[in-house]
Image (cartoon, helix red, strand yellow):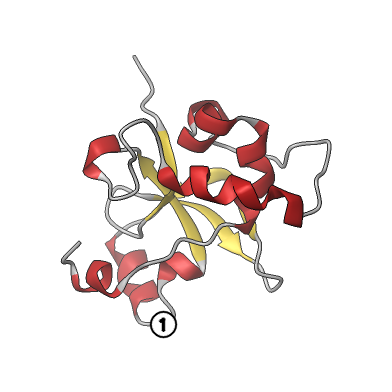
Amino acid sequence: MKTSIACPSNRCKPGSKLLGIRQENGTVTILPEPLSIDESFIEKVKEHPVPAERRFRFTNKCIENGCNQWTGKGCGVIEEVVQYLDRIPVNEVLPPCSIRVHCRWFLQKGADACTICPYIITEITENELSGTE
């Protein structure tokens, strides 16, 4: 059975899993294993004034051409953010990650993606919030 490629920065929606939690310092701590979420979780986090995607990181299947971030060759998010690597402390050891082996960003940019990953917060636009992506 082929494992699909995982998007490490998806939306809080049915089928997604909770991948990480944003910390007080603004970084994201990746969970040892992604946690399944259900409608109850989704409804509960929607009650908060700050969108779930700005407080948590979710993973789901990478949908390539079905995503606004797809460049035709890869994920535009990781292509954009790796240019900021010189602004963050680099550790020789990659942070633990439960999806690395099938992560779109890792498959695309290797260790550079893992180094910057904890600093990425999913940005949700007004169109996405209203469902008119």
Tell me which residue sits at (46%, 49%) in the image.
77
**Residue 105 vertical placement versus 46 (above, below):** above
Judged from the image, the secondary structure of the residue bearing numbered disc 1 is loop
- Tell me what residue is drawn at x 51 percent, y 49 percent: 80
Question: Relative to residue 25, is residue 54 drawn left or right?
Answer: left
The one nearer the camera, 16 or 62, is 62
Residue 31 visible to the viewer:
no
Q: Position of residue 81 (x, y in %)?
A: 56, 51
Residue 119: x %, y % from top left: 63, 57
**10 Å crowding of disc 1: few (<14), some (14-19), many (20+):** few
- Displayed quadrant of residue 73: top left
Q: Quadrant of the N terminus?
A: top left
Q: Residue furthest top?
A: 1
Q: What residue is at 74 percent from the left and 37 percent from the top?
A: 94
Please tell me whether residue 17 is drawn above or below residue 107 in the rendered image.
below
In the displayed structure image, the side of residue 118 where residue 87 appears, left or right: right
* Residue indicated by mark 1: 48
Left or right relative to 92: residue 38: left
In the image shown, does 81 or 50 lie closer to the viewer?
81
Q: Picture quarter containing residue 45? A: bottom left
> In percent of the image, x 27 and y 46: which residue is there?
67
Is 61 on the left or on the right of 97, as rendered? left
Residue 26's x, y, as percent?
65, 69
Quick one: 7 or 20, which is closer to the camera? Answer: 7
Q: Is residue 72 visible?
A: yes
